[in-house]
């Protein structure tokens, strides 16, 4: 225990001496057990106030920020006051993040908090490797604000073996695929985009544009057509129908629905609606030229406005399906606590503060008022161009706390909430397939998917000839073994969760 100073009451000499001796008697951070008197409790409170702040190392994904140090000075003033902690924020660029975090975690290099997701520093894989701290008890003790803010499906869908190992970002919860249209061309040829529902319904629109604009490919790239299945593994055609009742795991490529999609795409390819090299084409040059009619995207509320602002011309979209909560949509942005942290409680206190405190959330996201942004009203702002600080919003925590741009709808976050509440859960939500027993088969099947997938998805080959070959290759590489293992685990999960 640190020496007690500044005793401000006139006490007897004997009492004063005894207190000084008691204070010097041990440096055990208040573990002496003398907590029965009010005076002693007050002294312990003073000691707590004098403790050095806990320093937390936080890795997250972002490009470099010129003014990061300036912002973090203010962040740490605030976090010291609120939870007696200081944050050492370390940014790793987008293309390097997964690889570098794998090395850091595997080597045991110290860190306390790290960004993880379904697409960067893979959440499920890293949790299974033991890189992340199990958060169930910490959430109950120090994360009640998080639990109150999040839709329950976020925490349910991000469980691994029945436990939470990271905190999902409070943002859009479900996924909803849409057909996105270049409004300039749609208006020019009087296309009723509201009639765009199925893949087959697009044909009259594609035909109209191609006949009148022969140098335009209406579908400019590999759109990966929507298939009505919930996939158990990313990049592997193993899953269940989105409307399944029996939870039977199947080879998705070996279904009538998939065959129909591939047939339709081949028809469109032959008609000249896609570029000849679409299966291997890279980049989005068509977005700059405006020479395209439609593609497939995943939407959020007011996405058409955001896309239009980004592209510099109007786009509109129509839904392909209703909002659905998938495991991958729930785990698209998360913060995990290291399994090796020395400060799990303090790390959770910080994450709880980050996800509930409007001032802290906007400070970390937008930087310093008057330097990096202008405050226009209580909840709106305007960024200062080239200010030296612009963090990616969706990677940092509760987005519903963020200030809005001046052109954002006033009810932006209320509409996000309605979007989340409108969703239905995918059948495999909360089920995380453990690939340990079929790692070789998964690698081999992925190679087969990479070999055949791009050509089939873009219609570049005749599925009547190539799809049977692809299915046979998947079988030869072990897809049936993967399906059997997945079915076994799924049956066990169903039994445990009364599905």
Image (tube, grey):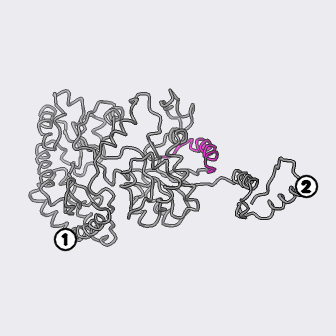
The verdict on residue 308 being magenta is no
Highlighted range, magenta: 63-85
Residue position for label 2: 13
- Quarter of the picture containing the C terminus is bottom left
Residue position for label 1: 476
x then y, percent, for residue 157: 35, 55
x then y, percent, for residue 288: 31, 36
Quarter of the image for residue 81 reads top right
For residue 147, say whether it is visible.
Answer: yes
Q: Residue at x 72, y 59 (%)?
A: 36
The verdict on residue 75 being magenta is yes
Tell whether 356 sits left or right of 42.
left
Dot placed on the residue nearer the N-terminal end, 1 or 2: 2
Quarter of the image for residue 363 reads top right
Magenta segment's dominant SS is helix
Eye-nearest disc, 1 or 2:
2
């Amino acid at each position: 225990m640190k020496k007690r100073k500044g005793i401000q009451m006139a006490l007897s000499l004997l009492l004063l001496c005894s207190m000084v001796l008691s204070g010097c008697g041990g440096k055990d951070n208040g573990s002496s057990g003398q907590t029965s008197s009010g005076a002693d409790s007050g002294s312990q409170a003073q000691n707590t106030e004098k403790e050095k702040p806990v320093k937390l190392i936080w890795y997250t994904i972002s490009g470099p920020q010129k003014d990061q140090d300036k912002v973090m000075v203010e962040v740490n003033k605030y976090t010291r006051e609120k939870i007696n902690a200081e944050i050492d924020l370390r940014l790793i660029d987008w293309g390097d993040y997964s690889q570098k975090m794998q090395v850091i975690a595997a080597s045991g290099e110290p860190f306390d908090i790290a960004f993880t997701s379904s697409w960067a520093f893979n959440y499920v894989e890293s949790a299974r490797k033991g890189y992340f701290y199990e958060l169930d008890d910490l959430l109950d003790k120090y994360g009640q604000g998080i639990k109150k803010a999040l839709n329950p499906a976020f925490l349910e869908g991000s469980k691994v073996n029945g436990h939470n190992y990271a905190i999902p970002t409070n943002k859009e919860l479900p996924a909803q695929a849409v057909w996105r249209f270049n409004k300039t061309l749609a208006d020019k040829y009087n296309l009723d985009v509201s009639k765009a529902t199925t893949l087959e319904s697009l044909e009259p629109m594609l035909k109209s544009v191609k006949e009148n604009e022969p140098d335009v490919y209406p579908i400019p790239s590999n759109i990966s057509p929507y298939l009505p299945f919930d996939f158990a593994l990313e990049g592997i055609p193993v899953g269940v129908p989105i409307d399944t009742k029996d939870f039977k795991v199947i080879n998705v490529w070996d279904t009538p629905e998939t065959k129909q999609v591939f047939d339709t795409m081949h028809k469109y390819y032959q008609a000249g609606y896609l570029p000849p090299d679409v299966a291997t084409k890279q980049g989005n040059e068509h977005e700059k030229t405006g020479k395209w009619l439609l593609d497939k995207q995943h939407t959020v509320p007011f996405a058409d406005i955001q896309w239009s602002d980004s592209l510099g011309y109007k786009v509109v979209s129509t839904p392909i399906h209703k909002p659905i909560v998938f495991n991958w949509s729930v785990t698209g942005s998360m913060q995990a606590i290291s399994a090796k942290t020395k400060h799990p409680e303090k790390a959770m206190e910080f994450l709880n503060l980050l996800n509930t405190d409007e001032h802290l959330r906007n400070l970390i996201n937008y930087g310093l008022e008057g330097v990096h942004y202008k405050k226009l009203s209580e909840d709106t702002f305007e960024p200062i161009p080239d200010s030296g600080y612009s963090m990616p919003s969706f990677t940092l925590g509760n987005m519903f706390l963020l200030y809005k741009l001046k052109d954002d709808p006033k009810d932006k976050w209320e509409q996000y909430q309605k979007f989340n509440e409108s969703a239905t859960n995918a059948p495999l939500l909360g089920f995380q397939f453990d690939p340990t027993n079929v790692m070789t088969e998964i690698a081999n099947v992925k190679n087969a998917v990479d070999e055949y997938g791009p050509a089939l998805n873009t219609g570049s080959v005749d599925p009547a000839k190539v799809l049977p070959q692809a299915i046979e290759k998947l079988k030869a590489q072990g897809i049936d073994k993967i399906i059997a293992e997945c079915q076994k685990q799924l049956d066990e999960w169903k039994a445990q969760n009364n599905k």
